[in-house]
Amino acid sequence: MNDQYFQARPHPWHGLEPGPDAPAVVEAYIEITPFDLVKYEIDKRSGYLRVDRAQRTSSLPPSLYGFVPRTLAADRVGGLMEGAEGGDDDPLDICVLSERPIARAEVLVRARVVGGIPMLDGGLADDKIIGILDDDPVYGHLRSIEEIPDVLVGRLLHYFSTYKLRPESAESVEVGDPYGIEHARAVIEAALADYVDAFGVGD
């Protein structure tokens, strides 16, 4: 039988590409959908999704949520956020808006970057890049975060402001005002460089 059908599954973080048009348009690996009551997260060692925690609040993710392959939030990313002690040492997070509901995780989508949300988690930079599903029939024409309906941006801000709140814990995050496309692209470029610093250049 042809060996091409038995190639090993690439690690979503290290084995996939951020896309030839990054940082303007990126490939996003989706971990969570707006329908998930459980927070799934990539297992850095195996590359499979693992259950991180059940959502503690009634708030659900308002968009597709995942990361950009071969990115890392480390010193360069941390240096772009005021008050950050560094990056959170995770792949760069991205939220992708789509008019049609996409209910499956572990899928790849092309996302046009339009802005981002700065978030400090324990003093570390944990940016949330915001993208639009490329060629989306309703949102695909949007080119900046200012063009996104306020209610959609508000849902993202509310979700990230509250998704770690628990009655028995004072744990919280600091979420700042959304930033535009130029800063979002700078964050992606910094995350790509942080990845190379940590892991070298991919194949």
Image: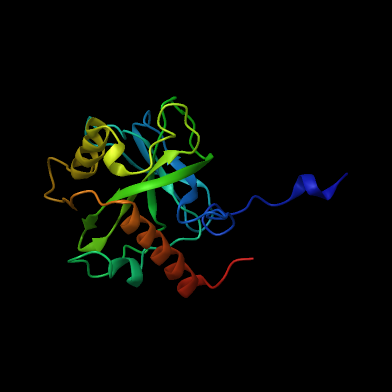
Rendered image coloring scheme: rainbow
- Residue 120 spot, x, y in % from top left: 21, 57
Give the residue drawn at x 36%, y 31%.
34
99 in relation to 77, above or below: above
Q: How many marks?
A: 0
Q: 4 or 168: nearer the eye?
A: 4
The quadrant where residue 65 appears: top left
Image position of 95 (left or right of 21): left
Image position of 77 (left or right of 173): right
- Residue 89 spot, x, y in % from top left: 36, 64
Give the residue drawn at x 20%, y 60%.
122
- Which residue ends up furthest to the right in the rendered image? 1
- Residue 169 spot, x, y in % from top left: 13, 47
Give the residue drawn at x 50%, y 60%.
70
105 in relation to 86, above or below: above
The quadrant where residue 54 appears: top left
Give the residue drawn at x 44%, y 42%.
31
13 in relation to 152, above or below: below
Image position of 201 (left or right of 181): right
172 in relation to 73, above or below: above
Rendered-image quadrant of the N terminus: top right
The quadrant where residue 5 appears: top right
Q: 164 or 144: nearer the eye?
A: 144
Rendered-image quadrant of the C terminus: bottom right
Image position of 43 (left or right of 57): right
- Residue 8 spot, x, y in % from top left: 69, 52
